[in-house]
């Protein structure tokens, strides 16, 4: 059975799927959290905190895009 | 001359299968975007068709698995490949008519295995590849997508649960343009490669290509075009099943389901596993529903889908074997494939006519 099933490949598939699927979903939700907080804090006239939230949202948005591009590049590299 | 005629019929049939694959499968890719209101149906389907086309050029790992790891290319003939394709197309149309999102990929592999067994016996099947690269990933992938989506949506609700719903919904609808696009790209790369693999297998069986050859460029371009056209042409009926009948989704769930599906398909494609994208996306949808509330998933509908999944391999294999048996009655020449092609085309025309008389499928608003 061990020779029929490439355990290492399957395990890597599981890990990559978990890391990619959950990771990107979570990072993107941080971007949305930052955007929502930015809107609230701006309304409350707290510019410093609003800027921090906007920065976090931008970083998380970029990280999401980077994750997507990385995933495609890794897949295409074989 | 006769073998060249058969090869042309096989290539045409494989491309027809690819078209039905897009027609049948890719609707699942766009269903979540449409049902959450992230994209209009015409935009979602147009984008999916384009990204299906692009995805077909990304990798050839899955094509290599289909061409070399499932059946023994040394004993396969173009006629066996043809009969397998007929089995897959017939099963695709039957499940399409019933509105069930079954697997085109498993139908293809089942059809080819069935016709190979009917022609040569079980020696033609490479058990190692069939079990290790098709059957086990087929079981693991939907469960993995379910787990990834459930875990993802659970964390998402913790992060954004207390924020204003309007901002969150708009954000995830925007995100669905990315996750839906990624899923369409993933679908294109995994599913179009199966057709590339089958055409390559036929070219190897015919002696046109060497045993270790990769798919030629014209095969890649033709497969990409066929699946993209299929995607653009249909699938409304199955959109309803996936997009609204399994669970009623919000945009965050749609994003999570699509992200999970794309991650599982892309990772599997990297290792050459010919997955069912239908199974994976439905697993993701169920996970996104169950992650919010177990009872949100309509498990009865999900159960019907599982039954269709279980039936696909043996049913397509049986039809593939039958198609080979009918073809073989006419001998080794081109007459058998020509006759079976004409019968298949007539049955397709009848199926479409019956669907048309029952009324056009209703788009999801």
Image: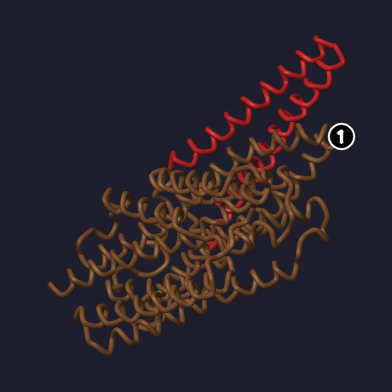
Q: Give the vertical position of A6 relative to B128 (above or below).
A: above
SS under mark 1 = loop
Rendered location of residue B75, percent (x, y):
30, 74
Q: Splitting the image into 4 quarters, where does residue B283 fall?
A: bottom right
Q: Does residue B286 appear in the picture of this structure?
A: yes
**Which chain contains the residue that carries disc 1?**
B
The residue lying at 52 percent from left, 78 percent from top is B314
Quarter the N terminus of chain A occupies: bottom right
Q: Residue at x 39, y 65 (%)?
A: B17
Percent x, y for residue B334?
Answer: 20, 78
Q: Which residue is mark 1?
A: B162
Q: Position of residue B277 (x, y in %)?
A: 55, 57
The residue lying toward the viewer, choosing from A19 and B191, is B191
Direction from residue B110 to residue A27 in the image, left or right: right
- Label tally: 1
Reply above or below: B294 against A33: below
Q: Quadrant of the C terminus of chain A?
A: top left
Does A48 sit above or below residue B87?
A: above
Q: Position of residue B252 (x, y in %)?
A: 72, 42
Residue A1 visible, this angle: no
Look at the image and give the colour of chain A. Answer: red
Q: Is residue B168 above or below residue B326?
A: above
Image-quadrant location for residue A49: top right
Q: Name the residue: 48% across, 64% down.
A: B105
Q: Nearer the viewer, residue B211 or B334?
A: B334
Q: Residue at x 51, y 64 (%)?
A: B134
Q: What chain is colored brown?
A: B
């Amino acid at each position: 059975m061990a020779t029929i099933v490439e355990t290492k490949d399957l395990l890597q598939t599981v890990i990559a799927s978990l890391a990619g699927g959950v990771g990107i979903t979570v990072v993107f939700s941080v971007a949305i959290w930052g955007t929502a907080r930015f809107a609230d804090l701006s309304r409350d006239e707290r510019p410093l905190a609003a800027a921090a939230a906007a920065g976090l949202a931008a970083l998380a948005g970029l990280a999401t895009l980077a994750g997507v591009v990385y995933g495609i590049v890794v897949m295409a590299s074989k | 001359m006769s073998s060249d005629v058969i090869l042309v019929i096989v290539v045409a049939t494989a491309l027809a299968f690819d078209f039905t694959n897009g027609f049948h499968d890719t609707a699942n890719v766009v269903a979540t975007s449409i049902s959450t209101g992230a994209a209009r149906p015409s935009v979602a389907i147009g984008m999916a068709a384009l990204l299906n086309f692009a995805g077909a050029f990304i990798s050839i790992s899955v094509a290599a698995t289909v061409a070399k790891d499932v059946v023994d290319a040394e004993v396969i003939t173009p006629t066996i490949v043809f009969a397998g394709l007929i089995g897959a197309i017939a099963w695709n149309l039957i499940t399409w008519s019933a509105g069930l999102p079954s697997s085109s990929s498993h139908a293809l592999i089942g059809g080819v295995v069935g016709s190979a067994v009917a022609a040569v016996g079980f020696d033609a099947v490479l058990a190692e590849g069939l079990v290790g690269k098709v059957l086990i990933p087929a079981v693991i992938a939907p469960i993995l997508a379910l787990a990834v989506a459930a875990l993802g949506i659970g964390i998402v609700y913790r992060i954004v649960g207390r924020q204003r719903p309007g901002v969150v919904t708009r954000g995830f609808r925007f995100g669905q343009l990315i996750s839906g696009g990624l899923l369409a790209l993933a679908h294109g790369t995994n599913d179009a490669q199966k057709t590339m693999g089958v055409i390559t297998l036929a070219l190897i069986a015919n002696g046109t290509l060497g045993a270790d050859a990769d798919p030629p460029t014209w095969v890649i371009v033709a497969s990409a075009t066929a699946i993209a056209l299929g995607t653009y042409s249909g699938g409304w009926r199955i959109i309803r099943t996936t997009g609204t009948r399994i669970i009623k989704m919000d945009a965050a769930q749609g994003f999570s389901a699509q992200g999970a599906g794309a991650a599982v398909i892309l990772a599997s494609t990297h290792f050459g596993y010919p997955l069912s994208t239908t199974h994976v996306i439905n697993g993701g949808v169920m996970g996104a529903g169950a992650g919010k509330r177990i009872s949100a998933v309509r498990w009865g509908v999900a159960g019907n889908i599982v039954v269709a999944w279980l039936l696909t391999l043996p049913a397509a294999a049986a039809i593939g074997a039958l198609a080979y048996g009918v073809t073989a009655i006419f001998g080794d020449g081109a007459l058998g494939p020509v006759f079976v092609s004409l019968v298949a085309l007539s049955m397709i025309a009848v199926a479409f006519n019956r669907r048309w008389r029952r009324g056009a499928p209703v788009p999801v608003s």
